[in-house]
Image (cartoon, helix red, strand yellow):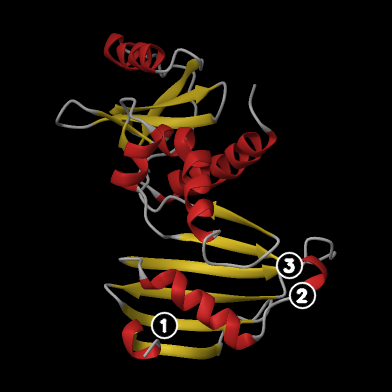
Amino acid sequence: MISKKTAGRSRMLALLLCVCMGMTSFGCSKKEDAAITPEQESWIEQFRTWYPDDTFTYISHGRELMGAYVDSCILVKSATYGNFEIRKEDSGELFSFYPNLLHNDAVEEYYEGMAKEYFDCDELSVYYSPRVYEHPSAPISDQEYIEKYTSHTYTLTLYYDGGAYPERETEIKELLSFIEGIESCDITVRYRDPEKEYGDFKYDYQYTIRCADGHIKYFNRWLPGQSQDPEEIFRDIDISEVNA
């Protein structure tokens, strides 16, 4: 049975997938005479072999922006995750967004587990949005996928009952401690009261942090809806200098 979290994440990732496909040279348009070829049918059969707990149905050829068919790409429907593309690379490997969908819950749980060691909050959650659109589609373990394809690029939400957030100095120390051992990061950390009713923005404030190799590129604090001129905490400084 698919969990509520899995179903919810799948819907969100499916929306992301459609946006991504709209930005590529391939479209999702269906055309009645776009019959599947025997070779393309073999790609779907391969997915059925790899992932027997799911069901895969052909929808259409991939198409370039001018409408020409792309024989190396087809659009397929997964009964579990919705539509995604299968693309055959020149190497013969089948690439797709399917691994991102399949391993998403494990990825979020992994990064949540890491964050729990650093923040004294009542609850936390991670929303992971893959930065790489497609990966080789052959089955691998959750751990191998995490090690090969993921990074600290996500939104981390920290929940504090009654909005009892730490003092600003404590918040910053916790955040610095969290990113200190990370090789690189591009994360948003949101502070939220789980019982509060929010409008368009589901948090009270957030930090955006980008770091690489022990160096902070920026570390800013934003209020809900703020689109520019954030409060700049750190910029272009080594973490070791900040923690000295």
Label 1 is placed on what type of residue?
Tyr
Q: Which residue is mark 2?
A: 164
Relative to 184, residue 75 above or below? above
Q: Residue furthest left?
A: 91
Give the vertical position of 88 relative to 181 (above or below): above
Mark 1 or mark 2, which is nearer the start of the sequence?
A: 2
Q: Residues within 10 Å of mark 1 (few under 14, many from 20)?
A: some
Per the image, the residue denoted by label 3 is 160
Could you say where residue 120 lies in the image, as x and y percent from the top left?
63, 68
Instruction: Tell me what residue is drawn at x 56 percent, y 62 percent.
Output: 156
Residues marked 2 and 3 touching at CB (< 8 Å): yes
Task: Answer left or right for 86 relative to 101.
Answer: left
Q: CA distance from mark 2 to mark 3?
A: 6 Å
State how far apart marks 1 and 3 are (Cα). Answer: 25 Å
Q: Is residue 224 above or below residue 3?
A: below
Identify residue for label 1.
218
Viewer-side residue, 168 vs 129: 168
- The residue lying toward the viewer, choosing from 116 and 219, is 116
User: Disc 1 on helix, strand or loop?
Assistant: strand
Residue lying at 33% horizontally and 90% vertically, measured from the top left: 241
Q: What is the distance, in whole Å, between disc 2 and disc 1 at their CAs? A: 26 Å
Q: Amino acid at mark 3?
A: Tyr
